[in-house]
Image (cartoon, grey):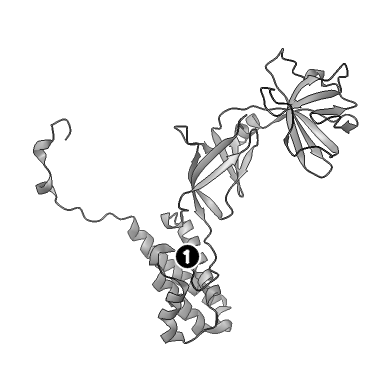
Amino acid sequence: MSTVTNLIDHVKPRIGEYPDLLWAMNNAVRTIQKRLFVLRSDLAKKPGGYTVTIAKEDPYGSMPSDFWGLWGRPYENNKNYFLVPVPNQGTILRYKPKTQDTNQGALTYPAATTFKDAGQDFDDWKNDGSTTTVYRLRVVNSDATESWGYIGDIVGADDTVITLYQDVDLDTAGWNGTDPSGKTPSTYEVQSQTTGDPRYYELIGTRLYIFPVRSTEITLHGDYFYKPTELTDVADTIPYSELFDDAIEEFLVKVVRSGKTGIDTKINQALFQSFLWDAVDRIVALRSEEAPKENVEGFIDWDGYSEYEL
């Protein structure tokens, strides 16, 4: 694998000593990587792929910081299927949390696991063990943090105070999201939520949304196109296993000989980009072609096969 120093040493006889070429090499590498991305080449694929963990009932997880685009569909290790792209807005609406009610009066946290709305009657959404329906309370605090939990039974005879639980089975009292201790609630929603094993996904920016959400934590895996690591030192390794070393070297020569004024002209920028793109296109087109097949009949033990195996 070549380093920055190796490539600079190769072109020194043509350009002499040049103070700093890291910026030009980074320019070349990013241009090459984006072309590989457009061509959906395996050379732009991140080795090892991604792992995204989405907390219980959270709608999305964040992709890695070097994420550029998905390569294929997400999957869960213990499932025998891939998630598929969400087909339409109707599917999103189907699985979106439904708001049942919002704040009515003064809001407080009376205790570590309870919530109070002085103007509300929580009787319609309580769960005292007589129903399998569990509603969720999502609170936005005055500092813009969010605390949420599953609604249990009403506290005492007052229908304005409820107990919150971390799990949908109402086993552990408490909150999810931000611990509300010491915080002031500003608004809230009582929500009903369809949960289950996710079947659909949607990528928005660097967030991977799932539909429906799951009542337990989920970890998704997959492959992705990645942003190349910036070269910051002359000892750094040039990516692509030397496939584009000669193209990067010629790019450096063109940049140095053009000078700053020449580099800034739009026509030269286009020509330099086209030069690298052409080098990428030639390699990518050949990588997918199969080598000529040899006649290996003389090396096969045909007698060792039955007619059913052939």
Using the rendered image of the protein, determine whether residue 243 is visible from the camera's viewpoint: no
Q: Position of residue 248 (x, y in %)?
A: 44, 72
Dot 1: element: helix
Using the rendered image of the protein, determine whether residue 15 is visible from the camera's viewpoint: yes
Picture quadrant of residue 129: top right
Q: Position of residue 278 (x, y in %)?
A: 41, 68
Tell me if 282 is positioned left or right of 224 in this view: left
Tell me if 270 is positioned left or right of 177 in this view: left
Tell me if 162 is positioned left or right of 227 in this view: right
Q: Position of residue 151 (x, y in %)?
A: 75, 24
Instruction: Name the residue located 27 percent from the left edge and 54 percent from the top edge.
Output: 290
Q: Name the one closer to the observer, 187 or 100.
A: 187
Picture quadrant of residue 133: top right
Q: Would you name the residue on which mark 1 appears?
A: 32
Q: Position of residue 53 (x, y in %)?
A: 58, 41
Q: Is residue 64 above or below residue 236?
A: above
Tell me if 132 is positioned left or right of 304 in this view: right
Q: Is residue 173 above or below residue 206?
A: above
Instruction: Name the residue located 50 percent from the left edge and 53 percent from the top edge.
Output: 225
Instruction: Name the residue located 76 percent from the left edge and 27 percent from the top edge.
Output: 164
Q: Name the one closer to the observer, 127 or 266.
A: 127
Q: Name the one closer to the observer, 108 or 104.
A: 108
Q: Quadrant of the C terminus?
A: top left
Query: Which amino acid type is marked by label 1?
Result: Ile
